[in-house]
Amino acid sequence: MTRPAEILDRTDQRKKHVPILKNFIGGASVAARTADSLPVTNPSTGEEIAVVPLAAAADVDAAVRTAHAAFGAWSATPIKERAQVFYRYKSLMERDARQLAALVHEENGKVMSEAAAQAEKAIEVTEFACSMPQLAAGEILEVSRGVECRVDRYPLGVVASITPFNFPNMVPNWTIPNALVLGNTMVLKPSEQVPLSSMRIADLLKEAGLPDGVFNVVHGSQAVVEAICDHPGIEAVTFVGSTRVAKIVYARATSRFKRALCLGGAKNHLIVLPDANEEMTASNVAASMSGCAGQRCMAASAMVAVGEVDNIIKRLCEEARKIIPGKNLGAVISKQAKERIERYITEAERDGAKVLVDGRNAIVPGMEGGYYVGPTVVDFVRPEMKIAQEEVFGPVLAIIRAKTVDDAIRIENSSPYGNAASVFTQSGGMARYVIERVSAGMIGVNIGVPVPREPFSFGGWNDSKFGACDITGKSSIDFFTKLKKTTTKWNPESQANWMS
Ligand code: NAD
């Protein structure tokens, strides 16, 4: 069928303005060796903003060979010089903070203040990476008279970083500065849903003076991830995403004898005790469940209400109603995500839960094509319901009632996840009791989003993380380096002992 001339023109014009992304290999944009691609949409409007190639194993191989070639000179560059590149990178991120945030807003749907906050976190990680010369220094000790032992850290080689859609700038920057300052080279595989920020990161690293080939980007989805896991030239893989894929990547990468650290999904429980401060608890819980449209692995997903806390729930609902889609609440990533989130609410309601604040069918005037879900509070959720057990990944809070703090801890402990948990109380003793018993890697006391700030490291427990070490902070130094132990004796008068 011939299309009317007007539609043809509009389509062709649109195509002209929608950039087709390329991989970034060896310091240059390189077309992917594939005809497969996907549209990238702006979740706030539903409009197509770019086309991302779904690269093939050959593209991964080209990137790994380039990163391998760059490794020799980069790893031989003194760490203090490597850190200088990241001082400049930090300044460039600060210079371009607004544009970086605008790009995240465009491809991910976060509101500008949230997009700016995640860029701030990327800057903080980079700041930390600049202190690697102090933190990653080796150790030396005279272990017997005239005999010394020294331990030096060595980079691993080419490492791969596979990232999710929810923090297009921050999560890649969890690994880039630390891994590279420590002397590794990298292949980044960003989420195909938000590939634009990684290209800006590549540009800024180049402008900061990072040698070509040290940092590379290959776009795509499952096939690229599988090629990364299988490639013999890659020494280590970090992954951040859902638990289902984290398990696949961890199993596949380690079966190829790679070091792997795979962060998965979450179901974070906020335990609210009757003595909790009403105002502070309500505003913290509301911000935690709705911030970034609930699409963060640290979001409050379940609130375990212990005893009589109806005053706090009432206040929480008031706070939730102040959160307006399109104003202080961003879009969720896709139409499918919106449908999935709304399905959880509808099923919970059908199974007897009570929807106190209902965010279904949210429409933002002027942005009718956007994928919005309003803040939603669902009370009287039973622990066996799907909304209580699975990661919803939307601005939805399930309230589960518990009679005692031990019941609340049992509910938290029964989750297979273990990213974060929080307790709201004014009793230090009670807080300590809960901290010691919840099964999660990051704990908050009267804090809704207990993200550890640098130099502390980020990482959960249980099905929220597979592999040793955490992904940021001091723990990442162990992941991204290997230790060489050298024992030295120069003088004949050195003490002889059992190992001489
Ligand atoms: P996802 O698991 O769907 O995708 C993550 C990455 O894996 C993407 O780059 C994607 O292309 C790739 N991928 C997808 N399916 C694959 C497959 N079958 N085989 C190989 N690779 C595949 O995750 P997402 O939807 O992009 O992100 C949301 C998830 O990430 C949530 O579960 C969230 O909790 C989690 N997350 C966790 C943390 C954390 O620190 N634990 C941080 C951010 C996000």
Image (cartoon, rainbow, N blue to C red):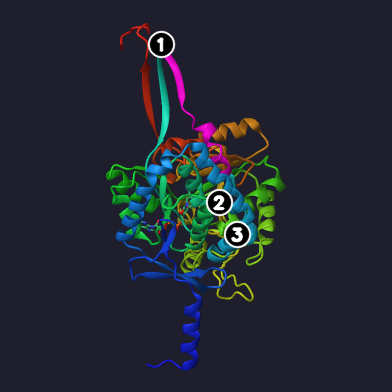
Is the residue at mark 1 in contact range of ligand 1, meaning its CB lies under 8 Å from it? no
Three-letter residue code for mark 3: Ala
Q: How would you rate the neighbour count of disc 3 (Cα within 10 Å): few for under 14, some for 14-19, many for 20 or more?
A: many
Q: From where the camera sits, is residue 473 visible?
A: no
> What residue is pinned by disc 3?
101
Looking at the picture, does residue 253 appear above or below residue 371? above
Where residue 358 sits, quadrant-wise, is bottom right
Three-letter residue code for mark 1: Gly
Q: Does the segment drawn in magenta span residue 142?
A: yes
Residue sitting nearer the eye, 343 or 153:
153
- In the image, the segment drawn in magenta is 125-144
Looking at the picture, does residue 354 appear above or below residue 154? below
Q: How would you rate the neighbour count of disc 2 (Cα within 10 Å): few for under 14, some for 14-19, many for 20 or more?
A: many
Q: How would you rate the neighbour count of disc 1 (Cα within 10 Å): few for under 14, some for 14-19, many for 20 or more?
A: some
Instruction: Mark 3 or mark 2: name the one nearer the start of the chain.
Output: 3
Q: Secondary structure at mark 1?
A: loop
Q: Secondary structure at mark 3?
A: helix
Looking at the picture, does residue 23 appear above or below residue 66? below
**In-image side of 311 versus 491 (left or right):** right
Q: Quadrant of ligand 1?
A: bottom left
> What residue is pinned by disc 1?
146
Is the residue at mark 2 in contact range of ligand 1, meaning its CB lies under 8 Å from it? no
Q: Position of residue 168 (x, y in %)?
A: 51, 57
Q: Position of residue 3 (x, y in %)?
A: 43, 91
> In which quadrant will I find the C terminus?
top left
> In which quadrant will I find the N terminus?
bottom left
Q: What separation in Å lies between label 3 and label 2 (alpha carbons)? A: 20 Å
**In-image side of 266 versus 71 (left or right):** right
